[in-house]
Amino acid sequence: MKIAARIALVFVLVLGTLQPAAQAAGSTVRVDYEDGSYALITTEAGVSRGTTSDYKTYTYYDTSGKRCFTYTLCADFSYNGRTSSADSAYAKTDFYSRGWTVDSHSEYTSGSTAYGQAVFSGPSGTRNVSLTLTCDANGRVT
């Protein structure tokens, strides 16, 4: 009986180390512009023990509600309960409406924060996008 209990305990401990620590829920913030256009900024995260890959997406809509473009900041973080670091940052851009272009963009990391900045031009004018993702020592990303 003691052997069966020990085997069951080892099995539970092994399974506990294989499963992800948490799956962060997405959040969305709306930004309204004076001309009636708006943007939605959505954050998504996937967490495993000690590392996390996170995404923040800026989606721009014109005054008629038509989606024009998205800019997504992607970042990889590592953490250990005492410290965290942003290991890499890159961006993805998608266009859904004619006439929009990306004039410039820059993605980089510093400490535990990933930064993304871009300038878009199109029929509605120029839109400056600035996104950040920051990871704490426990893998929570904001």
Image (spheres, helix red, strand yellow):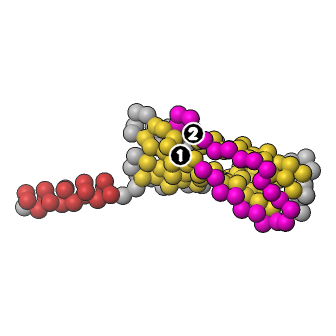
**Residue kind at label 1, given as amino acid type:** Ser
Q: Is residue 98 visible?
A: yes
Q: Percent from the top left, x then y, of residue 28?
A: 68, 52
Q: In this view, does 122 lie to the left or right of 77?
A: right
Q: Residue 11 carries which label?
A: none
Q: Residue at x 91, y 46 (%)?
A: 34
Position of the N terminus, as image quadrant, is bottom left
Helix, strand or loop for disc 1 = strand
For this view, does 19 lie left or right of residue 72?
A: left
Element at label 2:
strand
In the rendered image, the quadrant that contains the C terminus is top right
Residue 49 in percent (x, y) is at 39, 49
What distance separates the C-alpha of mark 2 from that of mark 1? 6 Å
Q: Which residue is drawn at 8% across and 59% down?
A: 3
At label 2, counting other C-alpha atoms closer than 10 Å, the crowd grade (few under 14, some 14-19, many 20 or more) is many
Question: What residue is shown with label 2?
Answer: 109
Q: Name the residue under label 1.
A: 88
Mark 2–mark 1 CB contact (< 8 Å): yes
Residue 14 lies in the magenta-colored region: no
What segment is highlighted magenta in the picture? 90-113
- Residue 47 vertical position relative to residue 87 in the rendered view, above or below: below
Residue 12 position, x and y percent, is 25, 58
Count the labels in the image.
Answer: 2
Frontmost residue, 14 versus 101: 101
Q: Magenta stretch containing residue 107, yes or no?
A: yes
Q: Is residue 138 left or right of residue 90?
A: left
**For residue 91, side relative to residue 78 (left or right):** right
Q: Tell me: residue 18, above or below residue 134.
A: below
Residue 52 against residue 5 in the figure, above or below: above
